[in-house]
Amino acid sequence: MSEPDFRPRADRPVGLIIALLIALAAAGWFGWQWWQQRQMPPPPTAPVASTPAPPDAPPPLAATPPSPATPQNEVAAIAEPEKNLPALGESDARMRAALVELLGSKAVGQFLQLDDFVRRGVATIDNLPREHAPVQRWPVRPTEGRFQLQGQGEVRTIAPDNAARYTPFVLLAENLDAAKVAGVYARLYPLFQQAYEELGFPGRYFNDRLVAVIDHLLAAPEPAGPLQIRVVEVKGDTPGDRPWVRYEYADERLQSLSAGQKLMVRVGLVNERRLKAKLRELRTQVATAVPASAGAKKP
């Protein structure tokens, strides 16, 4: 009888990176469909008090830059936000239907975690520049298959075929229309802003955080392979517990990267560059601030 394998069975590296694209695409399609179907504004109704879902404990602020007094990347420069948005805690059903229309039911079922989707997307985006990105808040499902290594012993290398596991996510990202996504993201922006403030950032502007996170991911290193991985045994609390293992980069410079930059490196050089190309497209759409040098008049 073979011994059970206690290695991690799945991981979600591209999912964490692609979350900022998928979250905006989901909101974008939902907003576009809803906006197109509205022939005229609905009659005003009395506001109904609702009890918001309790937010998660605020994450550490070490990776969050100081917030300027005013937003730097106004979404109103992209499109005016809608005034009659659904409540943040009541958008899941419409979001699910919209995502199926956008991606198809098979892709939605394969890739996405739809419950509390906006909050999941915002939390994941905010966590990418940090040391850890808690799996409980990811808006995507695990990457199929196992993380593939080759060699024996404590230090091994990432197998050349491992990058192919992430190709479906990369293709999904490349097929998104960044301009359309940004336009409808702006119309739905109050939902994202509310979710961000619930995380523990009142007075901070989520779109500024989004632009900063994109810049952070674009700054990820592009090391040539093969990359070495250290397999670290994690023992149980009591004697006799079977050990688990975790994977760390053998290169201390790579291991010290943020969660988001580690994942950019982990997907393989070709996939990393393809994802960066899409992130640059998205940044062009959502980064509305005018650089000081561009706005200054020449003497």
Image: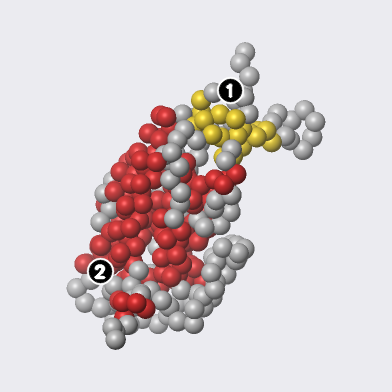
Label 2 and label 1: CA atoms lie apart by 56 Å
Residue 246 appears at what percent x and percent y? 61, 37
Residue behind mark 2: 35
Q: Is residue 182 visible?
A: no
180 or 97: nearer the viewer: 180
Farthest top residue in view: 1
Is residue 112 visible from the viewing direction of this image? yes
Q: What's under tag 2, amino acid-wise?
A: Trp
- Compared across the picture, whether 163 is left or right of 67 comes to left
Query: Residue at 63% of width from left, 19% of height from top?
Result: 3
Residue 118 is drawn in which quadrant?
bottom left
Q: In the drawing, does residue 79 fall left or right of residue 119?
A: left
User: Hey, which quadrant is residue 76 in on the image?
Assistant: bottom left
Residue 269 sits in quarter: top left
Residue 152 circle label:
1
Mark seen at residue 125? none
